[in-house]
Amino acid sequence: MKKSYTTLFAALSLLPFMLGSFSAQAVPSFARQTGMACSSCHTTYPELTAFGRRFKLLGYTMTNKKLGAKGLSIGQLPPISVMLQANATNTKANNPKSNSELPSELSLFLAGRISPDMGSFIQVTMEQDTGFAIDNTDIRYARQSGDNIYGITLNNSPTTQDVWNSTPNWGYPWTGGASVNAPIIASLGQSVAGLGAYTQMGNGLYAELSFYRETGGFDAPAGGVTGTARIKGLAPYWRFAWEKNLSNGDNLMVGTYGMQVKLYDNASTPVAGQDKYRDIAIDTQYEHFVADSDDLISVHATYTHEKQTLGMSAPGTSPKLKSLRLDGTYHWGHRVAATLGYNQNSGNSGAYDDNAWTGQISYLPWLNTKFTIQYTAYTKLAGVTSTASDNNTLLLQAWLMW
């Protein structure tokens, strides 16, 4: 093992003992608000349980506490949480071959109930290379009528508002993992602001329509006009999903989502024309509860077809990107989880041809403390198989929430 691994994780190995005096039920702000353990909303975070999905759809407002006076809804404690990630990585051949980061990410969350019908999930993250920046943000207003939920979401990245773990922002491997080409819906980052309306009809149909505008700092897709490319007007995003709680206690979701984005060149001497991207995805999630135990098997699959009409960066061309993501996890209660995932991209005459396997094991000595070992193996990268394995990466990570 590299010296950097030994030094970092010798220190990290002491953290569970230093954190031992904290109760997992009283650490993250959502747990403090509801009085419930982290495991009520999460299997192995950030994967959501059925209760966690409902908590999010209802605008992060559920609480077991009496808040404020009439017309006022302010809790006794501020809805603040902190996340720290520490990483050690080793890449087979690329430089730098080994790297340690403490912290690799440090996030502050303002996450909790604002009013009886409104709540927030706001993340500000510091990374070593980029400093502080606004990360995933979702502010919701939601009402319930019988078994139906109606809401409005204001967020800064498509699928941040989604409640299933098959979509890009909350999908496996959750951290690190394969670095391959991705459809534009998964690569916008936090460079947009979107407003949308959604409804969950009982335990059946979910429907959402949102519109996004650029807020700056957009990174154009590879091969396009970089640096000066901007999103034109509004970019519509839609989501439909059907969810069913089966008679044996299992849960099944089958859904579809998509987005259309138009880019133009904002340079002082702009390139003429527009680039158009249309993403259509189908996804599914299945959760199987193992009989006579607290164990759970979760499976996710997403297939995205992206059609590009490049009237600006490559006039007359219409490449396609086909992206497949699969993963399955076995959860031993809420303490250990083992996952295997597969990513495959194809299209655009080989430039998008990527294949990668990602396996990881996570251990949670406490519900707010997670240690992960992850290995990513590439079998093809940018259409090349002979040197793809040079990018194989081992990741060791400590992920702490309080």
Image (cartoon, grey):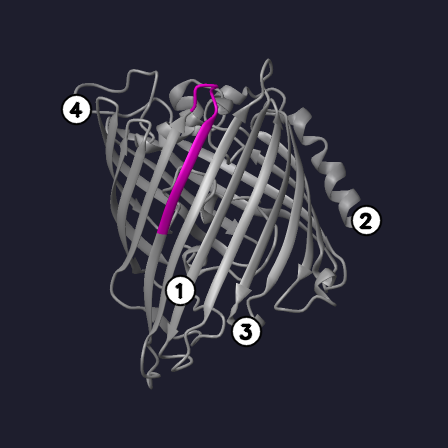
Q: Are marks 4 and 2 in contact (CB under 8 Å)?
A: no
Labels 4, 3: front one = 3
- Please tell me how crowded label 1 is: few (under 14), some (14-19), or many (20+) other residues with Cα within 10 Å: some
Give the distance between the C-alpha atoms of the residues marked 1 and 3, in whole angstroms.
29 Å
- Please tell me how crowded label 2 is: few (under 14), some (14-19), or many (20+) other residues with Cα within 10 Å: few
Q: Is residue 300 magenta?
A: no
- Please tell me how crowded label 4 is: few (under 14), some (14-19), or many (20+) other residues with Cα within 10 Å: few
Residue at 36% across / 32% down in the picture?
56
| Residue type beneath disc 3 | Ser
Rendered image: mark on residue 217? 1
Which structural element holds mark 3? helix
Rendered image: mark on residue 3? 2
Number of numbered labels in the structure image: 4
Which structural element holds mark 2? helix
Q: What is the span of residues highlighted in magenta in the rendered image?
A: 246-257
Labels 1, 4: front one = 1
Give the distance between the C-alpha atoms of the residues marked 4 and 3, in whole angstroms.
61 Å
Residue 180 at x, y percent in the picture: 57, 60
Q: Are marks 1 and 4 in contact (CB under 8 Å)?
A: no
Task: Name the residue at the front extreme.
Answer: 247
Labels 1, 2: front one = 1
